[in-house]
Amino acid sequence: MSRSRPFYADHAAAYDLLITDPVEPWVDAVHDVLVRTGRHTASVLDAGCGTGRHAAALTARGHHVDLADAAGALLDQAAKRCPEARRYQADLCSLDVGPAYQAVTCRGVLNDMITTF
């Protein structure tokens, strides 16, 4: 289980300086799939939203995007980018938001999730 993300909390201020890949190819692909499946204004949960770059780009394309991340400092930055979004500070392994979303996105987060016994 991924209960905390200390690396991201410790380096949240530098995150956008370090992670500079363009959001457009990924956001365009997600948007295209949503539109092709009739979800022109989809309700989306960005699980592991980081600083909200991708969520903001999906919002700009007309989707309603909510934010989820275990790192509070990153989630705070994402909330500034996406002030209309609901936010969930939670471990994605145990997050339960019910069937409220038409799509859930998750990029580069699964590598932080492990199960311990």
Image (cartoon, rainbow, N blue to C red):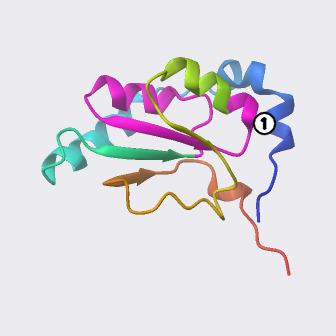
Q: Residue at x 60, y 48 (%)?
A: 108
Which residue position is annotated with label 1?
8
Answer left or right for 49 relative to 74: left
Q: Residue at x 60, y 45 (%)?
A: 48
Residue 53 highlighted magenta (yes or no):
yes
Q: Position of residue 68 (x, y in %)?
A: 58, 44
Q: Residues within 10 Å of mark 1 (few under 14, many from 20)?
A: some
Indicate the quadrant containing the C terminus: top left, top right, bottom left or bottom right: bottom right
Q: Is residue 112 visible from the viewing direction of this image?
A: yes
Q: Residue 21: x, y in percent?
A: 54, 28
Residue at 64% across, 22% down: 77
Q: Is residue 20 visible?
A: no
Q: Residue placed farthest to the bottom in the image? A: 117
Q: Amino acid at mark 1?
A: Tyr
Q: Quadrant of residue 65?
A: top left
Percent from the top left, x then y, of residue 18? 70, 24
Taking 77 as reference, is 54 above or below it?
below
Q: Looking at the image, which residue is at 57% across and 25% down? A: 79
Nearer-the-camera pick, 110 or 20: 110
Q: Examine the rendered structure and indicate whether residue 7 appears above or below residue 16.
A: below
Residue interval drawn in magenta: 48-74
Say whether residue 65 is magenta: yes
Image quadrant where one finds the N terminus: bottom right
Secondary structure beneath dot 1 equals helix
- Indicate the position of residue 43 as horizontal and vertical percent values: 32, 45
Task: Tell me: 11 left or right of 79.
Answer: right
Is residue 26 found left or right of 102 in the rendered image? right
